[in-house]
Amino acid sequence: MFILKAEAEFDGAHFLKGYDGKCKNIHGHRWRVVAEVASEKLQSEGPFEGMVVDFGDIKRDLKMVVDRYDHVLIYQKNTLKPLTIEALKEEGFKMEEVDFRPTAEAFSYHFFQLLSKNFYQVKRVTVYETPTNCAVYEV
Ligand SMILES: [Zn+2]
């Protein structure tokens, strides 16, 4: 089995509503996302002979899915009052509403799902919330 790995990073703020600990407050992370693409064989001809896929394709697709969350406040649907959202938007802050609790685990599944829409076989997505903590979703 051949495995390709590509990485991307984004700086995003989040909070965990209902969590009894420090993460209930708005705080930021440099999220590091590693996508792994698997293949039993290499391409046998053409410009990508000897490759699984072009690294550039994976990097581009990964960047596209993570860029949406770069330098934004990521919040789970129904965890902020409409008035709060309105006020923050009025201040010009970029925000992204998600329909999942924004944990490293949920992000690994989210990015896995988005990347799996591409032509190659995504095997695993790892999301680092800190340099030493990560969550993995794999098939
Ligand atoms: Zn956090």
Image (cartoon, rainbow, N blue to C red):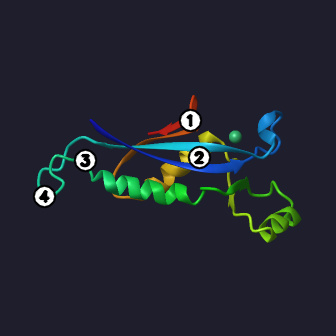
Amino acid type, callout 1 = Ala
**Up/down of 113 relative to 127, above or below:** below
**From the viewer's perspective, is 126 left or right of 48?**
right
Quick one: label 1, few (<14), some, or many (20+) residues within 10 Å? some
Numbered circle sitting on residue 46: 4
Q: Which residue is mark 1?
A: 135
Q: Nearer the viewer, residue 27 or 118?
A: 27
Q: Secondary structure at mark 1?
A: strand
Where, quadrant-wise, is the N terminus in this rendering? Answer: top left
Of the numbered discs 3 and 1, the one sitting upstream in the chain is 3
Quick one: label 2, few (<14), some, or many (20+) residues within 10 Å? many
Q: Position of residue 112 (x, y in %)?
A: 49, 48
Q: Secondary structure at mark 4?
A: loop
Q: Which residue is mark 2?
A: 107
Q: Nearer the viewer, residue 94 or 97?
A: 94
Amino acid type, callout 4 = Gly
Q: Secondary structure at mark 2?
A: helix
Residue 84 placement: quadrant: bottom right
Numbered circle sitting on residue 55: none
Amino acid type, callout 2 = Phe
Of the numbered discs 2 and 1, the one sitting upstream in the chain is 2
Determine the residue positioned at 83% across, 34% down: 20
Of the numbered discs 2 and 4, the one sitting upstream in the chain is 4
Determine the residue positioned at 57% across, 60% down: 68
Q: Are marks 3 and 2 in contact (CB under 8 Å)?
A: no
Q: Position of residue 15 (x, y in %)?
A: 75, 46
CA distance for labels 3 and 1? 25 Å
